[in-house]
Amino acid sequence: MSNSASIFNQISKKLSRETNLQNQLEIVVDGAMDLTNADAGTLYSIFEEKFLKFEVVLNRSLNINKKSPETDFPDIPLYKDNVANASMVVVNSVLMEKSIFIDDIYDENQYNFSGTRAFDEKTGYQTHSVLTVPIYDFEKKIIGVIQLINAQDNDDNIRVFNDNDLELINLFIMQTAFTLSSKILIDKQKSLFKSIKVSSNV
């Protein structure tokens, strides 16, 4: 736990020094990966209560580091034709307000990982274990979700995520929720400003 405490302390220092909000979100994802020794991580925000928006995508093996608006992945709808898009694990995590463990996506039938499998085929990557955790603000409202991929053991072999990983991530999210809350608020203000600007020009 001392190593975890050290990671928490390092993340806190990085966040206090960084003023760019998108860079702060990157620090949050990177920190969550350090806590669980995950190889990759993605952070989504809930946009207009309709979509999950890619904010940060990190993958250490593939040297991927993308932050919005350069993430270039399409938003994921929470609903399709007024029906919950529950075959997507990140969506189901949000709608059901629960954390979800997947030991190996290639043995998983409940959720649709076709996009992930296509990514693996294209890049040569091998996605196996996944942990998806909803993110709450201080009013206990879900404002996003973080997904971690391929936890690794001390010998860098892929392992499944466990309850200790989830406990660390939940504690971590509580301490960094303000960062994402600020991001959501700013996006809402921008959206409102655009709508006001458009209506005033009509």
Image (spheres, grey):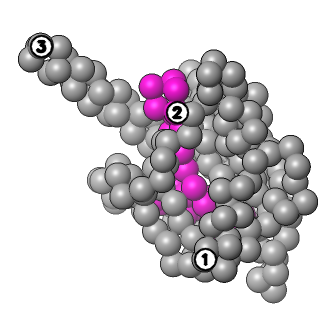
Give residue 145's quadrant in the image.
top right
Q: Is residue 82 above or below residue 177?
A: above
Q: Is residue 30 covered in magenta?
A: yes
Return the disc, 2 or 3, that comes first in the chain's sequence: 2
Cα distance in 3D space between marks 2 and 3? 27 Å
Residue 5: where, in percent of width, then height? 65, 62
Residue flagged by tag 2: what amino acid is it?
Phe
Secondary structure, mark 1, is: helix
Tag shown at residue 202: 3
Residue on which the image places disc 1: 123
Give residue 193's quadrant in the image.
top left
Secondary structure, mark 2, is: strand
Residue on which the image places disc 2: 51
Residue span colored magenta: 26-52
Residue flagged by tag 3: what amino acid is it?
Val
For label 2, count other residues whose C-alpha is less than 10 Å away and answer few (under 14), some (14-19) or many (20+).
some
**Residue in the image at 83% along x and 54% along y:** 102
The answer to whether residue 16 is seen in the rendering is: no
For label 1, count other residues whose C-alpha is less than 10 Å away and answer few (under 14), some (14-19) or many (20+).
few
Q: Is residue 124 above or below residue 33?
A: below
Cα distance in 3D space between marks 1 and 2? 26 Å
Q: Quadrant of the image for the C terminus?
A: top left
Disc 1 versus disc 2: nearer the observer? 1
Residue 23: where, in percent of width, then height? 38, 58
Give residue 18's quadrant in the image.
bottom left
